Image: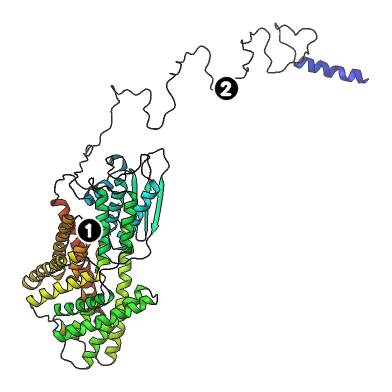
């Protein structure tokens, strides 16, 4: 078979594959008999197309014969806040209303700015009232980064001064709203401050943060910062950003109101007054004062060498305990336990304890945990210093009998005077303003009168008596702070000094040093209960004043609902 004969059946097969069906006209001469599968069949009219449009259309093209309303020429693509075209204000759709209704926001201007800011902080962002800018700035609006930086610097001074996390957030929020920055969210932890501002849902947020590395109790500086925030929140006082920065720089540069030798003498007088509270006499007063001043100087020496505060507390607790053991070994007719107890009063971290419990009660659990952990470390340092001295004293034959030392003679006049002196010296150690020292001294005397009337005269448990007395301190402190539009710390912290559990702490440590662990743990447990009663009582007194003694305002501060454990 030739090559032509081999190719002939193949061409016939290929031709039969693409043979047009019956009734379909074959292509004209000259065209290829082989057609594509996508070719238009003969007899089917092709759609009319323009010369510029392509025959291939998109899947989203509108089919022929479907009428679509042309778009309005004035409508443009809007933002997320633009109402849809199908929405009618005359016939709006049914809206969902919560069962409890929509809360009415009513913030009176005559209420202290702390309460107004706390109320708004507990609201959702969408329900907060619009800010009322009262501070002057240029026509372009406030410089957001500078306002946030000023806010963080103010919050840093407040947190470093010992203020609670809720009050720091309220102050930061007040500064932002004073310069017209809405939708701000401050956040405070133990060592970190942050603030976020988002003008609207479609704008990028601006966030800034600042770290607080050093904390020093200076209530004079704290009061000055509160006055600055109060002026910023006042609609009659216009403070520009430059003026606010200048005043803040002056607050930072101001020296402490009391020199170092006054602080050392105040720590000695505080220890001596505390020793009188637990039944000591004049010799005990002098011994406790000398031991506390020696411990204060040693702590200053350790601080100058860069040692952590844990070791500073350990070293400061040794001299009072050593003097008490020395008097016992010398068979002096004094109460050595009162000397050691007075020295412990000057070291117990009552300020940090109250702030930590307050943060926990107001929902700042991270900050509260950090503060309470700090208190625990300080307490362990005090325990280590006192136990070391007591252990060597017991080994040397010192007869320290806690049962004989429990008999505290009731001397109301001397004890009230000692409690007021203790509050006075505590206020000096906290670097308070001289104008507040008299009020906090009186508050401390009232607290001891309440405690003595319940514990000595009424024979009520010391924990309940301490809680009620601390509640009175918190109530009076909050009223005084409302009167002056200032922080409540200068009026409450020093006043709780006479209520601190110094004697229970000493007896617990003495029991452990004498291998009486059970009795020692009982006393230490009582000390912890008294400390918690002080902190909870102060916070409860403050809350009572806010709830029942509101002036010119009917709004209620929102709180979290009970979770029932889940």
Q: How is the image coloured?
A: rainbow
**Residue closer to the observer: 228 or 408:** 228
397 relative to 42 in the view: left or right: left
Locate residue 322, reporting x and y percent: 27, 86
Q: Residue 387 bears which disc, if any?
A: none
Locate residue 149, reporting x and y percent: 38, 52
Would you place residue 272 above or below residue 100 in this image?
below
Q: Name the residue at 18% across, 92% down.
A: 332
Can the viewer see residue 106?
yes
Badge 1 vs badge 2, beta-carbon distance below 8 Å: no
Q: Residues within 10 Å of mark 2 (few under 14, many from 20)?
A: few
Q: Residue 487 bears which disc, if any?
A: 1
User: How many badges with numbers are in the image?
Assistant: 2
- Which residue carries the number 2 mark? 58
Q: Nearer the viewer, mark 1 or mark 2?
A: 1
Locate residue 51, reporting x and y percent: 64, 13
Quarter residue 392 falls in: bottom left
Q: Name the residue at 28% across, 84% down.
A: 319
Image quadrant holding the N terminus, namely top right
């Amino acid at each position: 078979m030739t090559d032509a004969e081999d190719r002939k059946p193949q061409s016939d097969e290929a031709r039969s594959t693409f043979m047009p069906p019956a009734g379909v006209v074959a292509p004209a001469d000259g065209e290829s008999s082989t057609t594509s599968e996508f070719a238009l069949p003969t007899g089917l009219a092709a759609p009319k197309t323009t010369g510029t449009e392509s025959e291939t259309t998109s899947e989203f093209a509108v089919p022929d014969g479907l009428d679509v309303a042309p778009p309005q020429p004035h409508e443009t693509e809007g933002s997320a806040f633009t109402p849809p075209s199908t929405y009618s204000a005359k016939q709006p759709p049914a809206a969902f209303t919560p069962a409890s209704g929509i809360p009415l926001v009513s913030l009176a201007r005559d209420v202290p700015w702390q309460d107004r800011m706390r109320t708004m902080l507990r609201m959702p962002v969408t329900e907060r009232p619009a800010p009322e800018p009262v501070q002057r700035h240029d026509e372009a609006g406030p410089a957001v980064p500078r306002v946030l930086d000023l806010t963080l610097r103010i919050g840093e001074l407040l947190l470093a001064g010992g203020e609670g996390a809720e009050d720091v957030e309220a102050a930061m929020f007040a500064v932002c709203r004073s310069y017209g920055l809405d939708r701000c969210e401050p956040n405070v932890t133990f060592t970190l401050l942050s603030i976020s501002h988002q003008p609207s849902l479609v704008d990028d947020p601006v966030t800034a943060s600042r770290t607080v590395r050093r904390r020093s109790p200076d209530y004079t500086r704290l009061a000055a910062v509160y006055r600055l925030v109060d002026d910023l929140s006042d609609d009659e006082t216009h403070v520009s950003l430059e003026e606010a920065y200048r005043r803040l720089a002056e607050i930072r540069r101001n020296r402490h109101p009391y020199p170092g030798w006054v602080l050392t003498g105040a720590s000695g007088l505080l220890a001596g007054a505390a020793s009188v509270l637990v039944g000591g006499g004049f010799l005990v007063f002098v011994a406790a004062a000398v031991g506390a001043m020696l411990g204060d100087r040693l702590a200053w020496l350790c601080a100058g060498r860069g040692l952590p505060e844990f070791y500073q507390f350990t070293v400061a607790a040794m001299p009072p305990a050593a003097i008490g053991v020395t008097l016992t070994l010398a068979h002096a007719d004094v109460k050595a336990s009162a000397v050691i107890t007075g020295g412990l009063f000057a070291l117990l971290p009552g300020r940090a304890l109250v702030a930590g419990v307050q943060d926990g009660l107001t929902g700042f659990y991270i900050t509260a945990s950090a503060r309470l952990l700090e208190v625990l470390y300080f307490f362990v340092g005090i325990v280590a210093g006192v136990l070391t001295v007591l252990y060597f004293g017991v080994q040397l034959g010192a007869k320290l009998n806690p049962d004989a030392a429990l008999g505290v003679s009731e001397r109301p006049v001397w004890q009230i005077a000692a409690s007021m002196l203790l509050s006075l010296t505590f206020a000096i150690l906290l670097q308070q303003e001289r104008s507040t020292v008299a009020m906090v001294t009186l508050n401390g005397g009232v607290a001891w009168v309440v405690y003595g009337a319940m514990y000595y005269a009424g024979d009520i448990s010391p924990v309940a008596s301490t809680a009620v007395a601390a509640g009175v301190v918190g109530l009076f402190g909050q009223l005084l702070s409302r009167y002056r539009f200032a922080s409540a710390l200068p009026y409450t912290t020093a006043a709780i000094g006479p209520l601190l559990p110094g004697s229970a702490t000493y007896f617990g440590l003495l029991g452990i040093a004498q291998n009486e662990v059970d009795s020692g743990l009982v006393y230490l447990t009582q000390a912890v209960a008294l400390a918690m009663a002080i902190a909870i009582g102060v916070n409860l007194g403050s809350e009572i004043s806010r709830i029942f003694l509101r002036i010119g305002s009917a709004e209620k501060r929102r709180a979290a609902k009970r979770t029932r454990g889940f």
